[in-house]
Image: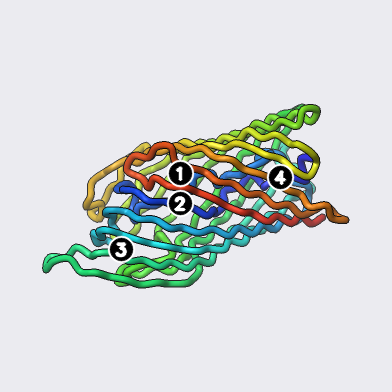
Amino acid sequence: MRSKFLTAGAASALMFLGIGDSYAAEGASSNYFPGSYGDFLIAAAPDPGWIYQNYNFFYDAKVNESVLQGRLNLDIDTFSYANMSVGLYTFEEKVLGATFAAAAFVPIAYVDLDATLATADGNVAVSDSVTGLGDISIMPASFYWSSGNWSFNLYETIITPTGKYDVNDVVNVGLNHWSFDTVFAFTHFNPDSGFDFSMATGFIVNTENDDTDYETGNEVHVDVMANQFLSETFALGLKGYYYKQVTGDSGRGAILGDFQGESYGLGPSLLWVPKTKSGNFSVTASWLHDLDATRRLKSDYAVVTLTWAFGG
């Protein structure tokens, strides 16, 4: 049952919708997306072989002010669509007594932005859109252990600055800096009752954007899921998250100061496994609402994930 409903326990993209004020992190965003660290049985080891996941996500937000490409932007209104493909391979051989897996995450995104650019000669209205490759993520090592009804997962995700980025442009797809996200997750699943409780805690270290001399502070994030399997093909859940930027933004480009963002949210999720001959396909969907946000977007987040599992 666990292998049917896994989400690979890895960071992924999601669709998110939001309106609010934001000051922390360059571009009012970071490489952490609330609620994106899995939905069901997140620490359960996948079966050996390949898994392909496809995420479709949208972003619609308004922000009073933020630093973009090293310049102060006001009254920002932005929309984006992204499709992310994920390939994960689980090895037959154990490593350190654990099931071992590795993965890569490749996003393609469309971004549209309208804003007012603050200049020495006054404010200027700007508008632009771009489509291109986003920041590719690599998960070089993911370890899964289990004991009875408990499962544990430790992994590292490296977000690379591969996305289209130019300081002379109004809008970009990439963030133009590296991020290193170390995550520990656990799952307790009772097969008799069908109840699943999972949690993922991570610490993100960000490097400087060399083109703008802006370094987003380090971040801590916690994602929690409580799920009930109603059958072998359907489950409902409740998920929540907490985010805290533990060090302030720095560098000459941090012209709004060393603000530290903080937020938390809650929302429902569901899983459906269509009855197929192989039983290797599943659909998950979730919605997450910010209950509070400080120096971050106060947002709604939603994602639909399609997962195909293939044998080794």
The amino acid beneath tag 1 is Ile
Whether 190 is drawn above or below 75: the answer is above
Residue under pointer 1: 204
- Residue 150 screen position, x and y as percent: 71, 29
Give the class, few, some or many, for how many residues have Cα within 10 Å of label 4's Cα (few <14, many ≥20). Answer: many
Q: Which is nearer the N-term, disc 4 or disc 2?
A: 4
Q: Which is nearer the N-term, disc 3 or disc 1?
A: 3
- Residue 219 screen position, x and y as percent: 42, 41
Q: Which is nearer the N-term, disc 1 or disc 4?
A: 4
In this view, the mark in front (1 or 4): 4
Q: Which is nearer the N-term, disc 1 or disc 2?
A: 2
Residue under pointer 4: 6
43 and 138: which is toward the camera: 43
Q: Which is nearer the N-term, disc 4 or disc 3?
A: 4
Q: Which mark is residue 31?
A: 2
Element type where label 3 sits in the image: loop
Label 1 to label 2, Cα distance in Å? 8 Å
74 and 132: which is toward the camera: 74
**Could you tell me if the residues under marks 1 and 4 are in contact, i.e. CB atoms within 8 Å?**
no
In this view, the mark in front (3 or 1): 3
Label 3 to label 2, Cα distance in Å? 16 Å
Model colouring: rainbow
Label 3 to label 1, Cα distance in Å? 22 Å
**Could you tell me if the residues under marks 3 and 1 are in contact, i.e. CB atoms within 8 Å?**
no
In this view, the mark in front (4 or 3): 4
Q: Which is nearer the N-term, disc 3 or disc 2?
A: 2
Give the class, few, some or many, for how many residues have Cα within 10 Å of label 3's Cα (few <14, many ≥20). Answer: many
Label 4 to label 3, Cα distance in Å? 38 Å
Residue under pointer 3: 69
The amino acid beneath tag 4 is Leu
- Residue 181 screen position, x and y as percent: 50, 45
